Amino acid sequence: MASTALLRRVLALPPHLRRSVYSSATTYHGASQPDIYDVVCIGGGPVGLSFVSALRSHPSTSALRVALIDSQDLSTARTTKDTETFSNRCSSLTPASLRFLKQIGAWEHAKKERTQPYHAMDVWDGVSGSKIHFDSVDQQQTGLLDAVAEMIPGSRFQASRRKYEVEDVGVATMCENANTTSALLQRLHELDEERSKDRLIFDMLEKTRVESIDLGPESKDKESLDLSQWPIVTTSHGRIAARLLVGADGANSPVRQFADIPSPGWDYNQHGVVATLDLDQQSTAQNLRTAYQRFLPTGPVALLPLPGNKASLVWSTTPQHAAKLKTLSRPDFTAAVNAAFRLMPLAWRENATPAASTGLPRNFPRIASVQEGSIASFPLRMRHADTYTGHRIALIGDAAHTIHPLAGQGLNLGLADAEYLAQRIAYGVDHGMDVGSCWTLDGYNSDRWAKNNAVIGVVDKLSKIYGVGSGPVVWGRSAGVEVLERLGTLKGWMMGAAAGVK
Amino acid sequence: MRLLIASTTKPYTTATTPQPPESSVNHTEVSHFSALAASWWDPYGSSRLLHLMNPLRHDFLRRCLSASPPDPAQKLDILDIGCGGGIFAESAARLSMAQSVTAIDPTPECIAVAKRHQRSDPLLMEAGRLNYLQTSIEELHNHTTTANSAGARGDREMKQYDIITLFEVIEHIRRPYPFLSSILPHLKPGGWLIGSTIARHPVSWFTTKLMAEDVLGLVPRGTHEWSQYLIPGEIREWARREAELNTSEGLGWRTMGVVYVPGIGWREVRGSEEVGNYFFGVRKRGDGV
């Protein structure tokens, strides 16, 4: 009798509460039925969070039951309040990535005073001194005539170089990864508030470790639910079944391993050394900023602007150099970075090295010091998964591809993956598809794989061409850079691709 | 590609003991589709073209409903006739606007395949969301009215649907007009009958018989009977003879021609409804109209 009364009381509850009473009851009894979700995303980095935000923001997918799993406590992913220190983990967000972050309502939560747009990029060759200058003006259709005119010595080419000052759109925007992450978390929190009535729709399973991923059990009979082709994620907090399991779980992706998707590639035998630097030039928000990259035989070294007098360093070099750099004192490290931008490989005294001969851009800042504790390094690899999808599986971000940082494209490719996969899922929902099936996922794979492969290929070849110190390759690449510099149209096309313009 | 019945002349009255309708299920067609049953859900099998076409069915359905958009709070009952392995029926049952989908097919193997595939989706296993019945349209009322057995057998009401779909079915039916008419009593006033088929035209003979079946092998040989194809004008003529149907362009009658482009997929092509695959929709007049 008592149980009948209890049952009646449970049935009187609204459906979502009824379900939660039911699921907690079954968990208590240790029942084997896993909790069922439409989309389970493993990995709460910027790529995974933006993917989930995109799903939650779109009217077609906002009713899907979504879980995000991360082993970290995501609530601590906040930037420091101190405006004098910046994280050494920064990304250069292209206009396409910014548009996506704005569209899903996340960018308005980013701390703008900690981001720095830049409007031009100077790239030069550390061996021959030949250089190439990119700015956002190049993105406009300058036409063949302009390109030919610029080839003529003494033309108005130099004057046109600074045209970008009237432009509003920059090449890209530097942003700390923690700033992006925190903006996305705030956006998800805001979406949760808006829809607090259906709490069960989205679950942020943080501080949750993935213990294993397996296929579901064979069904007991020929009538009941059959989850034998569904991925079941066993976590430190229970078991959940995924209609679609999304791996945003990084270069060593457990989801990719579960799906048995090969991810071939190679190691560059280089490490990326990152640090936050203080420059001798103070900038305000109104100043137009430039990013710098010099190709040395050991790898490219890049200086990317941050607000005020700050800048972010990405120096790709041999593992031995990287290890040595990390042991240097802060003044010695600062001197080494200045040397890397200013000296010729065999000319050690700066006053004996005329700046023009190295290709050093005008107004290139001097590095004053390095932020304490900001020097770190990581090995550089190229990996590209054979496919991004399987039955009820999709890979996004570093789980799908790892790329050399010289073009600053890693996170941008990942954000584009997140955007496109979320779009495909919305299309699938609108057309009644099973969003874990190939009918939804094939479009994501065919679109993103080819585009990413093109970028990965170009970046890989650039890194190899510039890894050579002398001989015909240097003459060839210098000639190539000089011609590129003069062909505004081609450069514009390259800039469009680099900025992610569609 | 699914198969149906047709041609009973028995009216759906409340006669005391309804005689079993003259079942005119085409047995050649039934055995043809039995042999195909295993490949319904193989992404690279012979049903691939149907899977690829399925999103367009939803686009066309939405276009028809846009004539007078239904209240989002009011969920729709859908009947899919000739459901085959359940490609459209499953997708319809997942739509947020769907209350229930009843899907019927006379081929037992198709229903078995459809039910087996349904079990791999917990959403579709929710009670009442998707019901497969091995039956013909003529026998359907025997299945759907037994559940609410209130009242005597003679005055029971037949369940009616907001949307009845008929995808790739009528080209497999020998006497399509009586078959189409037999569907109408199942449709709610204001509801849409939506289908797709192939127009009888030398072009469609070339594409669906010669190229698709004989040369490229995109669909199994013997799938189509070209002489049974109907052109849109013939279906509209039939609709005009049915007083309860609204055949005014856009409000009650719609067509959409689609073309399969290898390597790209199905695309809407204006005017192609006269020569190849096309969708048609016709609406039952509302109570007040």
Image: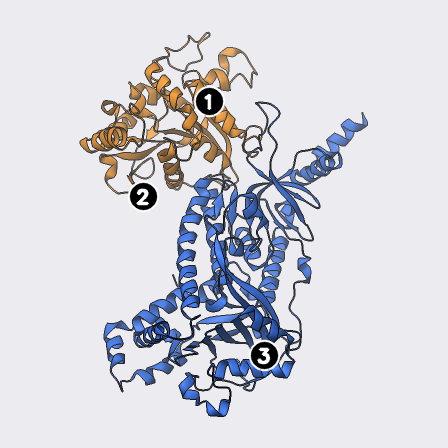
Q: Is residue A432 left or right of residue B49?
A: right
| Letter of the chain in blue | A
The answer to which image quadrant residue A178 occupies is bottom right
Instruction: Inspect the image, locate mark 1, and give the three-letter code of the amino acid beneath it.
Output: Ile
In the rendered image, is residue A87 in sight?
A: no
In the figure, what tint was chain B given?
A: orange
Instruction: Inspect the image, locate mark 3, and give the three-letter code of the amino acid beneath it.
Output: Leu
Q: Position of residue A469 (x, y in %)?
A: 42, 74
Q: Circle 2 is placed at which residue position? A: B263
Q: How many residues crowd around disc 2 within 10 Å: few (fewer than 14), some, or many (20 or more)?
A: few
Outermost residue, bottom side: A351
Q: Circle 3 is placed at which residue position? A: A277
Circle 3 or circle 1, nearest the eye = 3
Instruction: Inspect the image, locate mark 2, and give the three-letter code of the amino acid beneath it.
Output: Gly
Circle 2 or circle 3, nearest the eye = 3
Discs 2 and 3 lie in a common subunit: no
